């Protein structure tokens, strides 16, 4: 339970950071905004699609480490 609270706090802090929403250079921003609303939305969906496997792998590693640490202390 405590680990879940700490993870929720960490993800909350990372998600609320202004720098997290300010990624990218001016060239990328201007070229993406010139494409139009549909292309911007497609780009956003593509970024989220590429982010999902990395987050799943990260969560799996953290879970395995947590489970291993729990079995060692038990």
Image: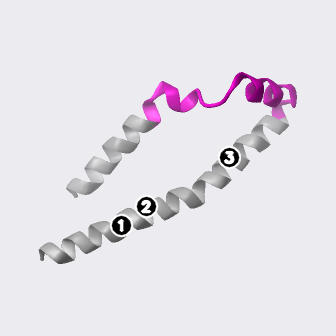
Q: Secondary structure at mark 2?
A: helix
* N-terminal-most mark, 2 or 3: 3
Taking the spot 77% from the left edge, 25% from the top edge, the residue there is: 27
Q: Badge 3: how crowded within 10 Å, few (<14), some, or many (20+)?
A: few
Q: Which residues are magenta?
A: 15-37
Render colour scheme: one colour
- The front one of 3 and 66 is 66
- The front one of 54 and 13 is 54
Q: Quadrant of the C terminus?
A: bottom left
Marks 1 and 2 in Cβ contact (< 8 Å): yes
Task: Kindly identify which residue carries mark 3.
Answer: 47
Taking the spot 60% from the left edge, 52% from the top edge, the residue there is: 51
Residue 5 pos. (x, y %): 27, 49
Residue 6 pos. (x, y %): 27, 48
* N-terminal-most mark, 1 or 3: 3
Task: Kindly identify which residue carries mark 1.
Answer: 63
Q: How many marks?
A: 3
Q: Badge 1: how crowded within 10 Å, few (<14), some, or many (20+)?
A: few
Marks 1 and 3, how far apart in space?
Answer: 24 Å
Residue 11 pos. (x, y %): 40, 43
Task: Kindly identify which residue carries mark 2.
Answer: 59
In the displayed structure image, the side of residue 63 where residue 17 appears, left or right: right
Q: Quadrant of the N terminus?
A: bottom left
Looking at the picture, does residue 20 appear above or below residue 66? above
């Amino acid at each position: 339970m405590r680990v879940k609270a700490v993870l929720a706090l960490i993800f909350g802090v990372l998600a609320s950071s202004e720098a997290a929403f300010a990624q990218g250079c001016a060239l990328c921003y201007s070229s993406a905004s010139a494409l139009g609303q549909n292309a911007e939305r497609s780009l956003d969906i593509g970024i989220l699609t590429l982010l999902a496997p990395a987050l799943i792998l990260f969560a799996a590693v953290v879970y395995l480490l947590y489970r291993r640490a729990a079995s060692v202390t038990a």
